[in-house]
Image (spheres, rainbow, N blue to C red):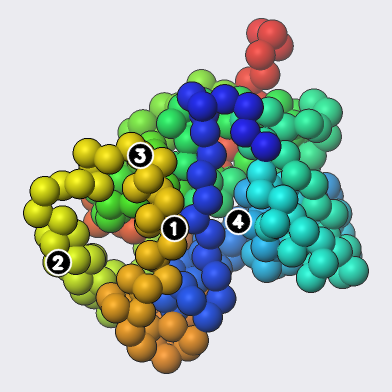
């Protein structure tokens, strides 16, 4: 449920068997990086989608809660992973219906870029984690991202560190990057996508109401993957999460930013 057009959250979710291998591997690598740092206890996965990423948190020492604004995604996640222990609820990521300081860790993976005003989402993450809790944020690196109507606010390194610093006393900022052949795969798909966009010679996608563009993009994306990324799905490329790594020194070529924030600054807490 979305409560504010200013902070509107959009769709665009990875789907196994449809999304290119490199993108699925990117998401898996991001969750791996989070898992190495987030610890035990009560863990919140905000924007859990269909739950297959949240399931990576399963551990005898963790209680995993996933939230998403999509009723369809929540239903799918509960059906597939509820029996294994995933607790799921439909919630707005900028107004979480959760008590303050309840979670030992929280994950926001490929979510923060989907808000026109992401500040309230970060404030909510700071509100729901404990004083000694940890928040992990994964988001595309602005210089390397490709045009996507669902990505409403892209971050560079300085902006992400600065915004998180307004809500957490301690912020580490790194990145999740890939081996050269994976970067080449992303670049090749980016070039193919740019060729398709050049067919829009009148720039109609930016002249039409944005809701129309999003509607068309959502329905054409699977077709575009077939045209632009033919043969890149279902494991055909051999690209896996093992081709990705965490770096302490992200630059403008790093594909994904990865931040770890601790010591939350809550509104009214001084």
Marks 4 and 2 sit apart, C-alpha to C-alpha, by 35 Å
Marks 1 and 3 sit apart, C-alpha to C-alpha, by 12 Å
Lower sequence index among marks 4 and 3? 4
Residue 190 quadrant:
bottom left
Lower sequence index among marks 4 and 1? 4
168 to 80, vertically: above or below: above
Look at mark 4 in the image and give the residue it sits on: 34
Marks 3 and 2 sit apart, C-alpha to C-alpha, by 21 Å
Look at mark 3 in the image and give the residue it sits on: 210
Q: Position of residue 185 (x, y in %)?
A: 28, 76
Q: Position of residue 239 (x, y in %)?
A: 42, 82
Q: Position of residue 206 (x, y in %)?
A: 23, 41
Left of 41 or right of it: where is 192? left
Lower sequence index among marks 1 and 3? 3
Mark 3: give few (<14), some (14-19) or many (20+) Cα within 10 Å: few
Residue 194 quadrant:
bottom left
Disc number for residue 218: 1
Marks 4 and 1 sit apart, C-alpha to C-alpha, by 28 Å
79 to 206, vertically: above or below: below
Look at mark 2 in the image and give the residue it sits on: 195
163 to 252, vertically: above or below: above
């Amino acid at each position: 449920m979305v409560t504010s057009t200013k902070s509107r959250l959009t769709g665009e979710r990875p789907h196994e068997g449809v999304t290119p291998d490199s993108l699925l591997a990117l998401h898996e690598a991001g969750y791996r990086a989070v898992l190495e740092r987030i610890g035990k206890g009560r863990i919140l996965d905000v924007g859990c989608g269909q739950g297959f990423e949240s399931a990576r948190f399963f551990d005898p020492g963790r209680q995993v809660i996933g939230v998403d604004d999509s009723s369809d995604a929540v239903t799918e996640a509960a059906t597939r992973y509820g029996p294994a222990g995933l607790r799921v609820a439909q919630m707005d990521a900028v107004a979480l219906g959760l008590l303050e300081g309840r979670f030992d860790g929280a994950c926001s993976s490929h979510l923060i870029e989907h808000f026109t005003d992401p500040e309230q989402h970060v404030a909510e993450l700071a509100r729901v984690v404990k004083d000694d809790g940890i928040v992990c944020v994964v988001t595309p690196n602005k210089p390397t991202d490709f045009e996507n109507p669902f990505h409403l606010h892209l971050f560079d390194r300085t902006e992400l560190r600065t915004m998180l610093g307004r809500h957490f006393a301690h912020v580490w900022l790194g990145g999740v990057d890939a081996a050269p052949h994976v970067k080449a795969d992303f670049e090749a798909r980016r070039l193919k996508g740019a060729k398709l966009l050049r067919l829009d010679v009148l720039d109609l996608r930016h002249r039409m109401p944005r809701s129309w563009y999003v509607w068309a993009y959502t329905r054409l994306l699977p077709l575009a993957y077939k045209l632009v990324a033919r043969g890149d799905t279902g494991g055909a490329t051999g690209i896996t999460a093992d081709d990705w790594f965490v770096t302490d020194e992200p630059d403008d070529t790093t594909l994904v930013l990865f931040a770890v924030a601790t010591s939350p600054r809550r509104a009214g807490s001084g």
